Image (cartoon, helix red, strand yellow):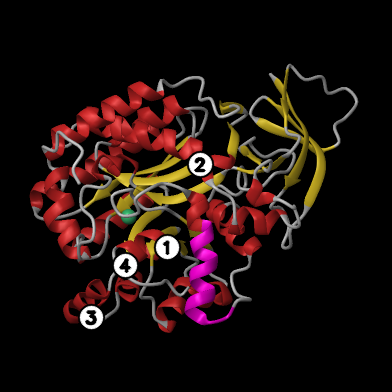
């Protein structure tokens, strides 16, 4: 199948400064055939009109827990520790594969509608997350979240190994599986060693939460005499390629450790704000040369999966917190949401920018809306004004998963109904509460 995306304003995200190409983008099968002007022999089976649209790489939500949409608007305005241990974890005890599938589907619809083509997820019941991702048609890096409360939890390592065997490479390679120790405060040192051994055995990356809250850092210093990042490094975690969510309270010494070990940081500005955890030192991380991607985190702490909001917050928060409007430019924020997110997840060879040979993961953003006019700047428009509802068409792996705002292969009303049923079953909340 050959597809021609016709007459768009193409933001390639291929270069260090913004590059626009006016014209067409050709897709042959799952890959980009050309950007700009096609060869004379390219005859398309399908045409997508991109006039009035920005064509750009699909966004990469590099840290989330998609099934947590079932707990969206369920536990708000609470301290982080109360939120996690008193509200979220007890409800998660009630999750079944069916609930996780239903929550995942809700999030996949939301991500498609906001222009996401790749995401990284850590959770339990991951077969259900993988199955939903496969059906939705997005690219996913999935990890079975690992927590250790006692020997009865050792089975989770085996489950991680089994999950990798069953799913890694499925969906024409769209599904990749990594190892996901939840955090150092839920994984004691001996368990972390086992996690690293598993990642070595499976030859995969590690996805973890690090230095998310001040309490996590204080507890780590009390228990181990070190910050969570120094502690993780000491336990060889970073001997594997690692993408670490948050790093909100990374010290200057921590940033050096991250840089030395080529650890990528996933910034989650909305979640960090909402849980009162603070602002990650994004400017210092970027200056040090650390790869920084962007994520929404789960929608129980955000409360949405809108990457356009994260891009906007990443730019604004860092300007505000450093009192310097020149830092985190619009283009830098877009790089975090596209090519740098891809780099963090190790998929920059196939996605995150638009060039011939890469997988066709791209979106059309409608600029025929008041907040894009009078059209001075594509990048400023995308970061300071765009809404996720401006996303008109989403193509992942060469296949349109949304076209002119219609998701052809999913029944959205059914997705909402099932998510509502599962949410009621796990929380006991049968009605819309104030
Ligand atoms: Ni998280």
Residue for point 81% across, 46% down: 21
Estimate the x, y position of residue 224 in percent, counting from the top left: 21, 78
Callout in the foreground (4, 1): 1
Under tag 4, what secondary structure? loop
Q: Is residue 127 visible?
A: no
Q: Quadrant of residue 427?
A: top left
Q: CA distance from mark 4 to mark 3?
A: 14 Å
- Numbered range of the magenta stretch: 311-324
Residue bearing mark 4? 212
Dominant SS in magenta: helix
Estimate the x, y position of residue 343 in percent, counting from the top left: 56, 55
Residue bearing mark 1? 269
Estimate the x, y position of residue 380 in percent, counting from the top left: 66, 59
Residue for point 34% across, 35% down: 104
Using residue 18 as the reference point, say whether residue 295 is left or right of it: left
Q: Quadrant of residue 196?
A: bottom left
Residue bearing mark 2? 114
Q: Is residue 82 visible?
A: yes
| Front residue of 155 and 308 | 308
Q: CA distance from mark 3 to mark 2?
A: 40 Å
**In the rendered structure, are the residues bearing label 2 and label 4 in contact, judged by CB atoms less than 8 Å apart?**
no
**Tag of residue 304:** none
Estimate the x, y position of residue 393 in percent, counting from the top left: 60, 32
Callout in the foreground (4, 3): 4
- Mark 1 within 8 Å of ligand 1, using the beta carbon: no
**Tag of residue 221:** 3
Under tag 1, what secondary structure? helix
Under tag 3, what secondary structure? helix
User: Mark 1 or 2 closer to N-term?
Assistant: 2
- Mark 2 within 8 Å of ligand 1, using the beta carbon: no
Callout in the foreground (3, 2): 2
Under tag 2, what secondary structure? loop
């Amino acid at each position: 199948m050959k597809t021609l995306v016709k007459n768009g304003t193409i933001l390639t995200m291929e270069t260090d400064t913004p590059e626009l190409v006016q014209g067409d983008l050709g897709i042959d099968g799952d890959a980009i055939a050309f950007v700009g002007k096609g060869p004379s022999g390219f005859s398309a089976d399908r045409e997508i009109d991109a006039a009035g649209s920005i064509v750009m790489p699909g966004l990469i939500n590099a840290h989330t827990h998609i099934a947590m949409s079932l707990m969206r608007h369920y536990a708000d305005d609470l301290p982080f520790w109360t939120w996690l241990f008193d509200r979220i974890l007890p409800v998660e005890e009630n999750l079944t594969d069916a609930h996780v599938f239903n929550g995942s589907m809700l999030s996949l619809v939301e991500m498609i509608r906001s222009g996401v083509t790749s995401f990284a997820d850590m959770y339990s019941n991951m077969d259900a997350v993988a199955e939903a991702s496969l059906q939705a048609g997005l690219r996913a890096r999935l990890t079975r979240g690992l927590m250790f409360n006692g020997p009865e939890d050792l089975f989770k390592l085996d489950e991680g190994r089994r999950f990798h065997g069953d799913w890694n490479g499925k969906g024409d390679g769209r599904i990749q599986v990594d190892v996901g120790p939840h955090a150092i405060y839920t994984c004691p040192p001996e368990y972390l060693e086992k996690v690293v051994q598993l990642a070595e055995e499976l030859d995969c990356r590690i996805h973890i939460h690090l230095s998310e809250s001040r309490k996590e850092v204080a507890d780590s210093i009390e228990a181990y005499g070190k910050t969570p990042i120094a502690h993780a490094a000491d336990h060889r975690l970073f001997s594997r390629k690692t993408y670490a969510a948050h790093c909100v309270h990374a010290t200057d010494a921590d940033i050096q450790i991250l840089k030395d070990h080529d650890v990528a940081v996933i910034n989650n500005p909305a979640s960090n704000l909402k849980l009162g955890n603070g602002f990650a030192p994004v400017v210092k991380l970027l200056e040090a040369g650390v790869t920084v991607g962007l994520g929404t985190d789960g929608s129980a702490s955000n409360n949405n999966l809108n990457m356009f909001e994260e891009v906007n917050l990443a730019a604004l928060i860092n300007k505000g917190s450093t009192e310097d409007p020149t830092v985190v430019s619009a283009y830098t924020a877009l790089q975090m949401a596209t090519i740098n997110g891809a780099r963090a997840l190790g998929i920059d060879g196939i996605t995150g920018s638009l060039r011939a040979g890469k997988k066709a993961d791209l979106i059309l953003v409608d600029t025929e809306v008041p907040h894009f006019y009078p059209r001075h700047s594509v990048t400023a428009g995308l970061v300071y004004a765009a809404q996720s509802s401006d996303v008109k068409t989403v193509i992942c792996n060469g296949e349109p998963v949304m076209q002119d705002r219609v998701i052809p292969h999913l029944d959205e009303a059914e997705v909402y109904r099932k998510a509502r049923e599962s949410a009621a079953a796990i929380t006991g909340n049968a009605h819309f509460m104030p």
